């Protein structure tokens, strides 16, 4: 077997720390955009890597007291130029530094595209939360919070939920942070329960925002959503709300999936009863009102709107030729590979790229932070109206750039974000 250990006399590759497929994808997307916009080389190199990174290992004690597992956690701040950094915390058994760094970089472009006063960040713990009891999840969250305590803060870096975390996890994070500083600091996280200062509408904001954008795209393409069909991969925070809100436009939801299985009904799923089943059992598996399909088959179903809202790297060179949607609305981060992007372009699929598609989440997180810092809560209608205004504005700017410069929507959205960050970097200058 080949020796995996690098001999001492061989230098490390410059990007060795981040050498993962997902970070490569984020960097390659960035480089494509940077080349198209003729970004200065010095600036390009400053934006290519995260500015601050923390890797921690800490003990996670099981309920029966006999086992203490060592787990790894990360917090990455990509760019500190724009204001505090902002980004979710992911609990997943595959999380690694490259993945968290890629997600942090995308957060930078997303916040800048949306004109939010934040740089991008992300955090993660490499653990499968579905295998933890509630008490274990709470202990893990509190210990992880303490490990990254010096990095976060309402004026420094503000976490939020991502895959595998939710409002309850944010409440424990806020409580642990507050206990350390001696008073309640609810503005240290967003996506927390409403009773602790969470914004009305934050929970469904990512899915809601995505469907606002689907409506814009459908109008642009002349698709009537009332007579359209939709398919959603992932039935968690983003997927569930996106499916419901798309169905509210009259769109027939043909299929949904989660980690357990996919459900398909060509007549359209009864979403209310699917929700009931998930409430009762936790998963889609075992639901009787539809055929089972695999996640791979689901992605290839013919439909008007396909929404990947689970994991990264789902639409690749292997299946892009067989994707049969008209609008690909990316709820998940990084669901489409570079190779797939060019195949989809050739085939005329209209892509709402992740940095735009799921930006509703961070936008309402921004609203939550603003409300917390001002101690003043907005109504749900006000939140949704502002979200709609900001997302449709970003959509129109992106579409205009895409049409004017003859580039795809992803590159156009990235340039919208990168240009703003590059300008800010130039204005602030180099220290010393
Ligand atoms: P979640 O944990 O609430 O739900 C994830 C869903 O994906 C679950 O239904 C799970 O069963 C399913 N899933 C997991 N592995 C799968 C697999 N192999 N095949 C099919 N389905 C699988 O997570 P979420 O918050 O909905 O996040 C989903 C995606 O959206 C992630 O990429 C996340 O980064 C992105 N996102 C989330 C938010 C947010 O506000 N929650 C904001 C922006 C982007």
Image (cartoon, helix red, strand yellow):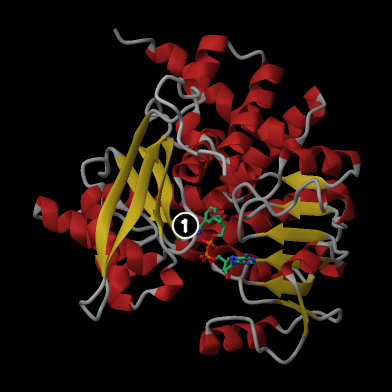
Give the residue drawn at x 69%, y 51%: 213
> Quadrant for ligand 1?
bottom right
Q: Mark 1 points at which residue?
A: 162
Q: Is residue 391 above or below residue 243?
A: above
The image position of residue 367, as x and y in percent, is 42, 50
Q: In this view, does 400 lie above or below 102?
A: above
Task: Write down the quadrant of residue 130 in the picture.
Answer: bottom left
Which residue reaches farthest top?
Answer: 432
Q: Can residue 24 be seen in this view?
A: yes
Q: Is residue 197 visible?
A: no
Q: Report the front residue among 99 and 201.
A: 99
Which residue reaches farthest bottom?
Answer: 288
The image position of residue 20, as x and y in percent, is 55, 40
- Give left or right: position of 129 versus 158: right
Give the residue drawn at x 73%, y 54%: 214
Give the residue drawn at x 75%, y 72%: 294
Q: In this view, does 44 lie above or below 401?
A: above
- Give left or right: position of 70 versus 14: left
Q: In this view, does 283 lie above or below 343?
A: below
Quadrant for the N terminus in the image:
top right
The image position of residue 137, as x and y in percent, is 32, 70
Is the residue marked by circle 1 packed among few (<14), some (14-19), or many (20+) residues within 10 Å? many
Give the residue drawn at x 80%, y 79%: 268
Q: Report the front residue among 383 and 96.
A: 96
Which residue reaches farthest front?
Answer: 1
- Give left or right: position of 288 versus 112: right
Quadrant for the C terminus in the image:
top left
The image position of residue 313, as x and y in percent, is 67, 50
Q: Is mark 1 on a helix, strand or loop?
A: loop
Q: Does mark 1's beta carbon lie closer than 8 Å to ligand 1?
A: yes
Task: Write down the quadrant of residue 325 in the picture.
Answer: bottom right
């Amino acid at each position: 077997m080949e020796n995996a250990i690098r001999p001492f006399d061989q230098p490390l590759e410059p990007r060795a720390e981040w050498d993962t497929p997902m970070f490569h994808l984020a960097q390659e997307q960035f480089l494509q955009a940077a080349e198209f916009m003729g970004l200065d080389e010095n600036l390009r190199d400053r934006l290519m890597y995260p500015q601050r990174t923390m890797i921690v290992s800490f003990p996670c004690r099981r309920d029966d007291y006999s086992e203490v597992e060592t787990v790894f956690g990360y917090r990455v701040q990509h760019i500190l130029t724009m204001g505090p950094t902002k980004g979710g915390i992911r609990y997943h058994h595959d999380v690694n530094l490259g993945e968290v760094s890629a997600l942090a970089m995308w957060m930078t472009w997303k916040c800048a595209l949306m004109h939010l006063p934040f740089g991008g960040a992300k955090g993660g713990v490499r653990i499968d939360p579905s295998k933890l009891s509630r008490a274990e999840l709470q202990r893990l969250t509190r210990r992880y919070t303490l490990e990254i305590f010096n990095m976060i803060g309402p004026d420094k870096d503000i976490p939020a939920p991502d895959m595998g975390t939710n409002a309850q996890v944010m409440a424990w994070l806020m409580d642990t942070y507050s206990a350390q500083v001696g008073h309640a600091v609810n503005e240290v996280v967003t996506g927390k329960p409403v009773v602790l200062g969470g914004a009305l509408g934050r929970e469904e904001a990512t899915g809601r925002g995505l469907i606002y954008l689907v409506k814009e795209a459908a109008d642009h393409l002349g698709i009537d959503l009332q007579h359209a069909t939709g398919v959603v991969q992932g039935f968690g925070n983003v997927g569930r709300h996106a499916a419901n809100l798309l169905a509210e436009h009259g769109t027939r939801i043909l299929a949904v999936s989660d980690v357990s299985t996919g459900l398909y009904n060509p007549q359209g799923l009864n979403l209310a009863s699917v929700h009931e089943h998930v409430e009762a059992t936790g998963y889609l598996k075992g639901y009787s009102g539809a055929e089972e399909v695999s996640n791979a088959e689901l992605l290839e179903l013919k439909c008007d709107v396909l929404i990947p809202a689970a994991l990264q790297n789902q639409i690749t060179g292997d299946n892009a030729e067989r994707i049969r949607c008209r609008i690909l609305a990316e709820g998940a981060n990084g669901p489409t590979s570079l190779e797939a992007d060019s195949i989809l372009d050739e085939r005329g699929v209209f892509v709402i790229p992740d940095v735009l598609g799921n930006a509703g989440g961070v936008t309402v997180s921004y609203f939550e932070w603003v409300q917390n810092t001002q101690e003043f809560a907005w109504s749900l209608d006000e939140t949704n109206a502002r979200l709609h205004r900001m997302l449709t504005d970003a959509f129109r700017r992106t579409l205009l750039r895409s049409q004017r410069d003859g580039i795809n929507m992803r590159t156009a959205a990235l340039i919208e974000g990168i240009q703003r960050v590059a300008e800010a970097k130039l204005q602030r200058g180099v220290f010393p």
